[in-house]
Image: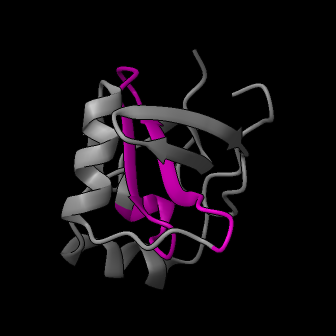
């Protein structure tokens, strides 16, 4: 599996040292917990959009959409990075969209 290193501006990577890495997600319950604990506000359509990375060992990490991918990744190389859109209905979580929108890691679409 290919790893993508951060290639963005150095000053953004330096700011990431004071930001905690993203929240590990292993289940739908982890998503609903993250949404509540991080005080996410749904969009007008009810969606939650998150910054995400998949770390080198394959764990999904999410952070607030305004977060930098390099911070979400804990400044480590990633298998994938982008944005993920969720819809949550009670304990059900639907992943509505996934992109590779990360100008700091520039992952291929197939990542």
Locate residue 94: give its quadrant.
Answer: top right
Q: Quadrant of the N terminus?
A: top right
Reply above or below: 39 against 3: below
Left or right: residue 102 compared with residue 51? right
**Viewer-proximal residue, 100 or 8?**
100
Locate residue 17: give its quadrant.
Answer: bottom left
Magenta region: 44-71
Location of residue 103 in the rendering, given as x and y in whole percent from the top left corner: 70, 63
* Residue lying at 59% horizontally and 61% vertically, measured from the top left: 46
* Residue lying at 47% horizontally and 34% vertically, measured from the top left: 93
Reply above or below: 104 against 58: below
**Viewer-proximal residue, 41 or 90?**
90
Location of residue 80 in the rendering, given as x and y in whole percent from the top left corner: 58, 36
Left or right: residue 53 compared with residue 56? right
Reply above or below: 53 against 12: above
**Viewer-proximal residue, 70 or 40?**
40
Location of residue 56 in the rendering, given as x and y in whole percent from the top left corner: 40, 27
Left or right: residue 47 compared with residue 22? right
* Residue lying at 33% horizontally and 82% vertically, measured from the top left: 15
Q: Residue furthest top?
A: 1
Q: Does the magenta-highlighted stretch encompass residue 109?
A: no
């Amino acid at each position: 599996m290919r790893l993508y290193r951060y290639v963005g501006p150095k000053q953004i990577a330096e700011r990431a040292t004071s930001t905690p890495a993203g929240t590990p997600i292993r289940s739908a319950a982890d998503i609903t917990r993250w949404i509540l604990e991080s005080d996410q506000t749904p969009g007008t359509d009810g969606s939650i959009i998150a910054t995400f990375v998949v770390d080198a060992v394959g764990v999904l990490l999410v952070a607030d959409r305004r977060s930098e991918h390099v911070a979400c990744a804990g400044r480590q190389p990633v298998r994938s990075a982008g944005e993920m859109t969720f819809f949550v209905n009670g304990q059900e979580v639907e992943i509505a969209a996934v992109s590779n929108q990360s100008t700091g890691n520039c992952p291929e679409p197939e990542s």
